[in-house]
Amino acid sequence: MRTVYVNGDYVPETEARVSIFDRGFLMADGVYEVTSILGGKLIDFEGHAVRLQRSLDELEMRSPISKDDLLEVHRELVRVNDIDEGMIYLQITRGAPGDRDFAFPDPETTTPTIVLFTQNKPGLADSPAAKKGMKVISIEDIRWGRRDIKTVQLLYPSMGKMMAKKVGADDAWMIEDGYVTEGTSNNAYIVKGNKIITRALSNDILHGITRAAVLRFAQEAQMEVEERNFTIDEAKEADEAFITSASTFVMPVVEIDGIALGDGMPGRVAPRLREIYLEESLKAAV
């Protein structure tokens, strides 16, 4: 049985409790992060901690824990649950004021709720899916405008994944004003020639921690990177495509809306970037 962390306590998962009045439950008034674990160490912890604080600041929510203490909680959960490869999910909400109200509760009297739990994923780095690539479909992007804040409002991304599964695909890329924004839980890229193309940072997409690392490694490897909008039709004509996220690292995309890219197999760029990312991230893991 897993040990989880709830508001300062380590408890068995069956004993974990959060109030029915918690605003994360009632209003999706919360933010989250997912940090991968490889070799029992945390990948990109600093980046996730910084983005967490940014999300909290944007929602005028205070953190119930310091960054140093948060790191120790992550490490303790890895230790007690004996995780070699997997993930840690972290969620902070505005708390449970004792009743339901649209207005924010007084932060002096309502303490934010914090929960963390591990997910054991053996074989995370050596994923079979990375060798064969994934298939995506395109769907309309109807999410709210502040996608740069990593909130727990994940209903439409969940619906998008189900839309993909219903037609035998793995995920969906969302389209707004004719341009790809991102995947349901990942950043999206295409490759044309030797150029990696991905949408620039704005409020329209999540500022991916893995995205930042992968683009930095790509430039260090003398790969050309262009940050701009691209259409779904342009993506279908690309030489390669891929996604990045904390849980998939770099994952090749081999089909979009039923149209195979190249020969329908992972190309040269995405597998190489995955290799570099894993190698460099393991060196820096904590």
Image: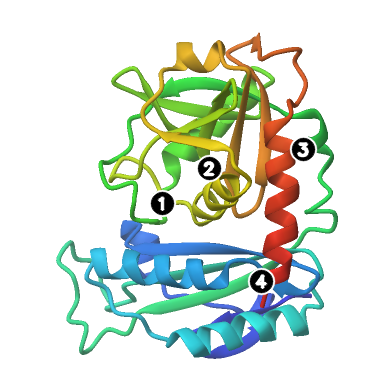
The residue to which callout 3 is attached is: 130
* Nearer mark to the viewer, of 2 and 4: 4
* Nearer mark to the viewer, of 2 and 1: 1
The three-letter amino acid code for the residue at tag 4 is Ala
**Vertical arrangement, residue 169 with respect to residue 129, above or below:** above
Tag of residue 102: none
Quick one: label 2, few (<14), some, or many (20+) residues within 10 Å? Answer: many
The residue to which callout 2 is attached is: 186
* Nearer mark to the viewer, of 4 and 1: 4
* Residue 103 image offset from top left, x and y in percent: 14, 66
Residue 261 placement: quadrant: top right
The three-letter amino acid code for the residue at tag 3 is Ala
Residue 56 placement: quadrant: bottom left
Counting residues from the start of the chain, the first of labels 4 and 1 encountered is: 1
Q: Secondary structure at mark 3?
A: helix
* Residue 117 image offset from top left, x and y in percent: 63, 71
Q: Is residue 261 left or right of residue 234?
A: right
Counting residues from the start of the chain, the first of labels 2 and 1 encountered is: 2
**Vertical arrangement, residue 144 with respect to residue 19, above or below:** above
The residue to which callout 1 is attached is: 207
Q: Nearer the viewer, residue 170 or 262?
A: 262
* Nearer mark to the viewer, of 4 and 3: 4
Counting residues from the start of the chain, the first of labels 2 and 4 encountered is: 2
Q: Secondary structure at mark 1?
A: loop
- Whether tag 4 and tag 3 are in contact, CB under 8 A, the answer is no
